[in-house]
Image (tube, grey):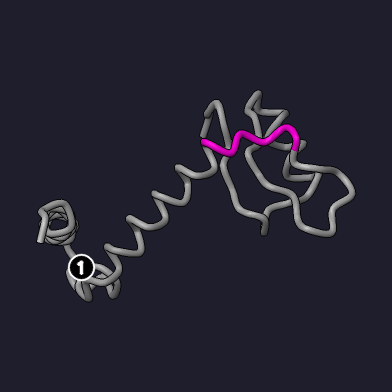
């Protein structure tokens, strides 16, 4: 899909992936590995930190067994359980 940025972790650090992202007129936000000869001068660390927040939200959702194992096979029931889990996470305990 078309987007302004492609945010990924160090596992996707390769010039082939970066070039493919640039071909689609997007900016790659992918940190380089530790042994890379090129530095991280062009990365937007603020966007990369938001990626971490999204991953944490998915990790919290996976604590609910019905969501992690896709216990509900029907789309409506799964979406209802997902909404309930999001409400449980959102509410202060």
Displayed quadrant of residue 73: bottom left
Q: Which residues are magenta?
A: 41-46
Count of numbered marks:
1
Q: Secondary structure at mark 1?
A: loop
Residue at (73% x, 45% y) in the render: 17
- Of residue 73 and residue 18, the one placed in the foreground of this image is 18
Residue 58, percent from left and from top:
34, 58
Q: Looking at the image, which residue sits at the far front?
A: 93
- Of residue 77 and residue 31, the one placed in the foreground of this image is 31
- From the image, tell me which residue sits under label 1: 73
Task: Please give left or right for residue 59 compared with residue 78 in the image.
Answer: right
Specify few, some or many for label 1: CA neighbours under 10 Å numbering under 14, 14-19, or 20 or more.
few
Residue at (13% x, 61% y) in the render: 81
Q: Is residue 57 magenta?
A: no
Task: Please give left or right for residue 88 compared with residue 22 in the image.
Answer: left
Residue 55, percent from left and from top:
42, 55
Q: Main structural element of the magenta stretch: helix, strand or loop?
A: loop
Residue 44, percent from left and from top:
61, 34
- Of residue 84 and residue 92, the one placed in the foreground of this image is 92
Task: Please give left or right for residue 30 compared with residue 40 in the image.
Answer: left
Give above or below for 64 relative to 2: below
Give above or below for 77 relative to 65: above
């Amino acid at each position: 899909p078309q987007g302004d940025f492609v945010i990924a972790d160090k596992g996707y650090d390769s010039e082939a992936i970066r070039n493919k992202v640039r071909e689609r007129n997007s900016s790659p936000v992918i940190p380089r590995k530790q042994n890379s000869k090129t530095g991280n001068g062009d990365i937007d660390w603020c966007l990369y930190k938001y990626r971490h927040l999204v991953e944490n939200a998915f990790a919290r959702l996976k604590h609910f067994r019905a969501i992690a194992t896709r216990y509900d096979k029907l789309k409506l029931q799964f979406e209802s359980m997902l909404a309930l889990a999001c409400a449980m996470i959102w509410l202060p305990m």
